[in-house]
Amino acid sequence: MGALKPGLARLAVFVAGAAACLPMGGPPAGRQVVAGRGAALGAIIPAGDDGLLRVLVLRPGATSDAEDLSVIALDAANDPGPEVPLIAGIDPVYGVGCRTYGRAPCSVDPTGMVQVHGTDGIWKEVNAITGEIQPPQSVPTGPFGSLTSTSGGRSFQAATQTSGTLSDADGHTTPIQLAIPSGAPPYQFFGEDFYFLDPQQELIDIPPSDVPRTAATGVVAFNGTETPAGPVLLLTRVTAGPPAVTQTSVLDPTSGMETLLPFNGSNAELSADGQWVLDNQDQSEGKFIFFDYRSGTQQIVQIDGEGGGFPVWRPGTAEVWMTVFGLGDTHAVWVLRPDAPPVSVRGAYMLYVNMNNYRNQPFTDDGAYWFFTTTSLDSATQVVQVGRTDDPTGPAFPLNPPSTFLDLALPLPDGRLLTTAYPKDEDRSDVTVVDPRTGQSDVVARRGLLLTSGQTRVMGLFHIAEGRGDLTTIDLGTGQATVLAPEFTVTASAEPQGADALAPGARIVYQFQARTASPYDGIWVTPCP
């Protein structure tokens, strides 16, 4: 071939330079295990007994509205095995579930079962370790679905409103026939014990030994609370009549003691410590009755104000908190307990805050702090405050700046709260650490999306633009931020180490995609600093 003309030579140099255009700075951290722009990170499966970390990969399917799922196993040295196809024809909107329910990607439990939604509209489960595809199944909808025990070792899956399967950690299963539900689902875990109503209206307890026992008969509905001494249950029965009468009683399954309530129990609630029953039948008149079912004593608490609230028990106590509306737009938070005068916080409104995985609640898990606002409810955004529950009218501190939305407030092991807040877009949140004891507030990252929070570190995508950002880990003790992959990280997930979701040295798997084609495009793995 002869020499190029000068103009063509300049064009060739330009094209070659554009094709080799790389992101600014050095390469992403770690090792590239999948190259190219055609692979998307779906999820990871933490290493099990075989020591292999499995990476779920989504690739374009046979049509534009489908994806195919495959898996790549990484050994301890992060050497990848062959990419193994698992299942084709996945709905790209759902993927492996992470895109629908939150921050993608996510981790799948070590058993390797992955639920997918096909383009044919059918739900399926595929085992990413064995490749086995379970028969098509329908997913229960409405209030009846799956439930797990406190430890997560036992689970119940409803097939219909009147049937389901109890599964133990060792794989043993028990078919369950349920009573026709009367409002709430007729089953519940208390600790590791599974309680349910059978078609004969008997309340059955199946402990981990799988030897069932009858706890009560003639029950049409039940609920309860777990205490350190065991569960305490509220039972509803209907007498034969005529006329038929609804009766509510309190049952202590450990002792077998059952006490009939001395009032209409249709609105009765058990205290979080399991000692008192609250009757709020007359709450519109500001009257609340606390009943000690063990001694038979009653305490009446009267508050001023009009309009009802929704009573919420402070964890582990006999304190009930609620927002009560008065005349006009005035409102206050009232704290009621049977052994002390009521306390009010005027102008305050209790708020339910996301404490991780969309578990919204007005208290921290230990009941030491509560969340509220004094911002006008007509405002588009509210400044969320945190205060001590043992001093409701005492000092309180803001968790988010004005004109922002508080998205998350995660409790950290050292007692601080990790918060995310944004003015318009959740993907451009600022991450702040707030000490609820002192109000000390430190911004640790800006304009991004928090992906994972561990005991000492957090990981996220920050300075996001066009769906990509700096993959960054932050040491919460020192505030040190480490950028693992600049600018163009799309998603990332960390392999949990025991109870720590982001331990030092844990493997982080992420997808990198530059603005234009780059040799760095693909899926990478690197240790957490």
Image (tube, helix red, strand yellow):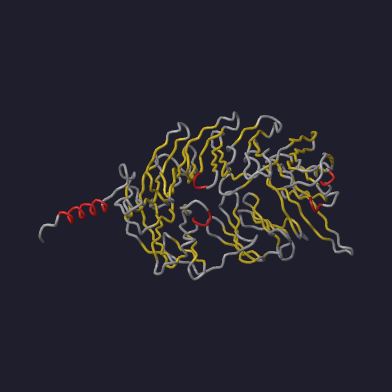
Image quadrant containing the N terminus: bottom left
Q: Position of residue 521 (x, y in %)?
A: 33, 52
Q: Residue furthest right?
A: 242
Which one is in front, 406 or 256? 406
Residue at image position (41%, 59%) is 129
Would you say 489 lies left or right of 364 here?
Answer: left
Q: Position of residue 467 (x, y in %)?
A: 44, 51
Residue at image position (76%, 59%) is 219
Q: Position of residue 55 (x, y in %)?
A: 39, 55
Which one is in front, 457 or 521? 521
**Looking at the image, is 62 positioned above or below residue 295?**
below
Image quadrant containing the C terminus: top left
Residue at image position (61%, 56%) is 147
**Looking at the image, is 398 positioned above or below residue 99?**
above
Which one is in front, 141 or 430? 430
Would you say 451 lies left or right of 84 here?
Answer: right
Residue at image position (79%, 45%) is 278
Choose top left, top right, bottom left or bottom right for residue 161.
bottom right
Choose top left, top right, bottom left or bottom right for residue 306.
top right
Q: Residue furthest bottom?
A: 120
